């Protein structure tokens, strides 16, 4: 059973940077899209950014110009580089991987806290 393992969350001051990593482990399906979602307290989970196997990216307007998503297909790993963090970026960040046959897996989430 494949799984996603996230790392890189933590506490940072406003204006700071963090880099999240997501690594697929175990017997996982062939991944097409890898993405990062986030869920703030009392809010719905929302897409932050995703990237296809060919490198096409989709980034939410709220983070465009501040966050960059990338991936290493050979290592089944995705990254989210976050710059100019704001308190409103505080959330649990989840990694997601989708295959070609409607298969999907989620990571356990990593907390990002941005202090003002």
Image: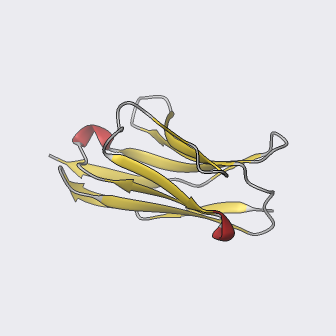
Which quadrant is the N terminus positioned in?
bottom right
Q: Position of residue 11 (x, y in %)?
A: 27, 59
Q: Is residue 45 left or right of residue 112?
A: right
Q: Is residue 104 left or right of residue 40?
A: right
Q: Is residue 52 left or right of residue 84?
A: right
Residue 73: quadrant of the picture? bottom right
At horizontal 51% and vertical 56% (from top left) the residue drawn is: 70
At horizontal 33% and vertical 60% (from top left) the residue drawn is: 18
Q: Is residue 49 left or right of residue 106?
A: left
Q: Residue furthest right?
A: 101
Q: Position of residue 102 (x, y in %)?
A: 81, 39
Please tell me which residue lies in front, 116 or 60: 60
On screen, residue 110 above or below 56: below
At horizontal 57% and vertical 55% (from top left) the residue drawn is: 108
Please tell me which residue lies in front, 106 or 52: 52
Q: Position of residue 9 (x, y in %)?
A: 39, 60
On screen, residue 77 above or below 67: below
Q: Position of residue 39 (x, y in %)?
A: 45, 38
At horizontal 14% and vertical 46% (from top left) the residue drawn is: 116
Residue 100: quadrant of the picture? top right
Residue 9 in view (yes/no)? no
User: How many marks can you see?
Assistant: 0
Residue 90 in view (yes/no)? yes
Query: What color scheme is it?
Result: secondary structure
On screen, residue 76 above or below 56: below
Please tell me which residue lies in front, 101 or 53: 53
């Amino acid at each position: 059973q494949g799984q996603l393992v996230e790392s890189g969350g933590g506490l940072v001051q406003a204006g700071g940077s963090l880099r999240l990593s997501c690594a697929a482990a175990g017997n996982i399906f062939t991944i097409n899209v890898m993405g990062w979602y986030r869920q703030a307290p009392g809010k719905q989970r929302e897409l932050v950014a995703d990237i296809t196997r060919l490198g096409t990216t989709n980034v939410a307007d709220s983070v465009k110009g501040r966050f960059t998503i990338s991936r290493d297909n050979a290592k089944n790993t995705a990254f989210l580089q976050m710059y100019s963090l704001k308190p409103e970026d505080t959330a649990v960040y989840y990694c997601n991987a989708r295959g070609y046959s409607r298969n999907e897996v989620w990571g356990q989430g990593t907390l990002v806290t941005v202090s003002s």
